[in-house]
Amino acid sequence: MRKKIAVIGAGLSGIAAIKQLTDGGHEVVCFEKAESFGGVFADKKIYEDLHLTISNYFMAYSDYVPSQQKLKFWSKKEYVNYLGEYLARFELGQYIHYDHEVRKVEKQAGKWQVTTKHGMAEQTDTFDMVAVCSGHFQKPKLPELAGLDMFEGEIEHSNDYRDKHKYAGKRVLCVGLGESSADITSEISEVASKCILSLRRYPAVAPRYMAFQEDPYFTIDTSWLTSRIVNKLPHRYHGGITKGIFNKYVNSRNDHVRIRGEWLKKSGPSHHQAVTKNERLFRPIADGKVVPNIGGIVRFEKNAVVFQDGTREEIDAVVFCTGYQLSFPFLDVSISNMRDLYKQMFIPEMGDSLSFIGFVRPQQGGIPVIAEMQCRYLSQLACGEKSLPPLSEMVDIIKYDTEHWQTEYKITPHVASLVNYCHYMDSMAKLVGCMPEIPSLFKDPLLRVKLLHNPQFAAQYRLDGPNKMTHTARSFLLGFPNISSWPRIIHFELALITQKLLSRLRLDGLRELSK
């Protein structure tokens, strides 16, 4: 059944929604408040020197993989160019209404009334369904810190940062560490008279390019970190690999690599926390341009900051790289945590007519392909090919998933939307019906290695199922080199066999006890 669907936002999630929903035969109208597509990556929305921390193969949609390009990290401009090519290739631009700000979304008599503002005029249109693709980066989050209201220096959030030169010759405090903070703090340290970085704990920071691989050009997300086999096996296998790498880091002759290794060891197991995939900051730390203070802030004074360790530093400016909070000003429903939603997409009591796309943060891999998978499921729900589970079942699944992810990422439980990319994608693929069948070593050994031991590229989910692209997907997957040596592949295969045997023995034992 064809539905009329409103898509809010023409960023990477909104573009995925337009494509997958129109593929399903639905009538789509996308409202974008800016004058161009790309969301946070659009012109003037973010600092110019940005380079993505996810490689191009994971930031691309599964039906348009840039396989003719080498594996790389796109710049902001390159990624926007890719999105433009995608829109043009599939003629998606016709569905986007630019300079249309969504002011109100409310349900009346089983339909959604969407009110938008274009120029000075407001208009209300009726839709069967609404897909919210506005993204996390809407409302900057500032921490509540004693004395901040008395601080007389300049206060800025990373959302508003554009140019390092405004901090030339100043004493600057940067608070928080994420991908953006690593860039911003590094840039500011180049011109500031002093640059201090305040962190509450040692974070896990990974490099863009994976060191100590057989091929030095493998990226962090095309390493064993995103292989299905490592994410199937117990954490000790993941920890064993990272321990060996961290030991190499701390013994490196490069001081910035050594410092990063020391931080990683202090941060705790990387598989239990959010990981910052931007190592840029450690060079200025090694050079003395950035001075870290670990432990947190006690209070601000009119021209200074006092840290937990008792240190007091006079400063002229503060840049908060402290993330964002959920904000849906056009909705009359309040969402404080995306984990309260079924698959972090649907408010259980409201069914499938209102969805939230792209609000999942993968520990590894990219948001675009997750948003795409979510939209493939949404399209099937809209058609009536699939249906959501009963309310009570959804509530149980939400509870189970929440407990699972909180246990998985127990070191950083405040990152409320964090998931394991490999597990989440497989769970969604099973709902869509595009979960790849992993063949045995005897039936199709090459494909088995690519599906099980290589990166879990989104192309895997185009081998079969709705809108499959079997030949294209298989060609791409088989063409990507093996990321592990054959001895490691054999080791993991044996480990998987052992795990299955032990699970079967435990199950047989439980059955015997129950008799």
Image (spheres, grey):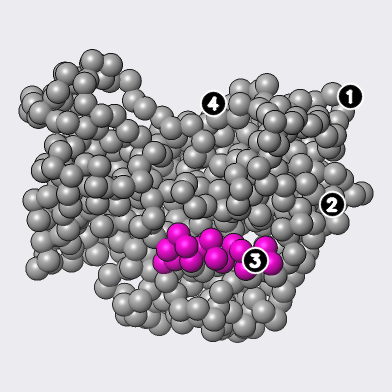
Looking at the rendered structure, which numbered label has been put on residue 26? 2
Q: Which residues are magenta?
A: 73-88
In the picture, the disc for residue 86 is 3
Discs 2/4, front = 2
Question: Would you say residue 264 sits in the magenta stretch?
Answer: no
Residue closer to the observer: 346 or 494: 346
* Residue at disc 4, secondary structure: loop
Mark toward the viewer: 1 or 3: 3
- Depth check, front residue: 90 or 190: 190
Mark 4 nearby-residue class (10 Å; few <14, some 14–19, many ≥20): few
- The structure residue drawn at horizontal position 63% and vertical position 34%, both measured from the top left corner, is 341
Report the Cα–Cα distance between label 4 and label 1. Answer: 26 Å
Asked whether, in this view, residue 420 is left or right of residue 335, the answer is left
Residue 263: give x, y in percent of width and height.
19, 49
Determine the residue positioned at 17% across, 31% down.
316
3D distance between C-alphas at marks 3 and 4: 33 Å
For numbered disc 3, what is the local secondary structure? Answer: helix
Instruction: Choose between 271 and 498: the one closer to the eye.
Output: 271
Question: Is residue 455 in view from this perspective?
Answer: yes
Residue 278 image offset from top left, x and y in percent:
32, 56
The amino acid on which the numbered mark 1 sits, given as a three-letter code, is: Ala
